[in-house]
Image (spheres, grey):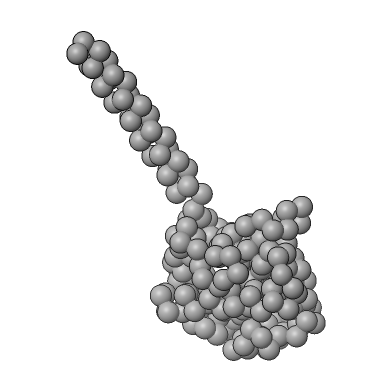
Amino acid sequence: MSKNPGRRSLVAILSLLTIGAAFSTGVAKAADDVTEDQILRALAPAKKPLTRGLSAGPQTETDPAAAAEGRFVQTLRNRPTRSLSLTEREEIATIVKDKPKIDLEINFDYNSADIGAKSLPSVQALGRALSNPDLKGSTFIVAGHTDAVGSETFNQDLSERRADSIKRFLVDKFGIAGTDLVTVGYGKTKLKDPAHPTAEVNRRVQVVNMENKATASK
């Protein structure tokens, strides 16, 4: 009988340690969720300085390359994901290299276009960010990616469905205009972690700000 209090104390201590460890793990996972502010900062378009010519009022220099890029982006709006050719997909990949972007690591269930439960907070933060006046009205690329398991054809289709899944969520849950979201799939051709081609981080969606509101509204 005299040993029971000691045993109960030991059990109580172990229980507290277990609860503390579980709580600590939960906090760490929550801290990994991207925030609306982080997305806003990452996707904010760079401000181009105005130049003043001999005539009164601020002027901007016309960049033929930027103008051509803008025309290309306009051709992508309202396009179904599957309608993009390989050439168009690669042109998008080239353009986005110098654009404000964020890889949200939105993970999906294996062989599925269903958004993983642990990624919902990040997708919701994305919806709030794209609804923010600082970004609202811009045109965004939503690019789907898969891991390297399976054929090229299968993964290309899966990546397109994943991009569509994010677009549908943003349109349905946050009222973002579908014309402002250009979806593209890259299958397993652009792995985030080539050294581990089957890793979960490869099953993701990247979001890129293609143009600011002033350009998009023209």
The structure residue drawn at horizontal position 75% and vertical position 74%, both measured from the top left corner, is: 152
In this orientation, which residue lies closer to the viewer: 137 or 196? Answer: 196
Residue 162 seen anywhere in this rendered image of the structure: yes
Q: Is residue 67 left or right of residue 111?
A: right
Report the residue at 71% width, 85% height from top: 84
Give percent across and percent down for residue 70.
69, 82
Is residue 46 placed above or below 183 in the rendered structure? above
Image quarter of residue 59:
bottom right
The spot of residue 16 in percent (x, y) is: 33, 30
* Quarter of the figure that contains the N terminus: top left
How many tags in the picture?
Answer: 0
Can you tell which quarter of the image residue 173 is in? bottom left
Quadrant of the drawing holding the C terminus: bottom right
Outermost residue, front side: 1
Q: Residue at x 47, y 75 (%)?
A: 169
User: Dividing the picture into quarters, in which one does residue 6 lie?
Assistant: top left
- Residue 25 versus residue 58: which sits nearer the camera? 25
Image height check: is 102 above or below 164? above
Q: Residue at x 59, y 78 (%)?
A: 161
* Residue 31 rendering spot, x and y as whole percentages: 47, 47
Please tell me which residue lies in front, 142 or 49.
142
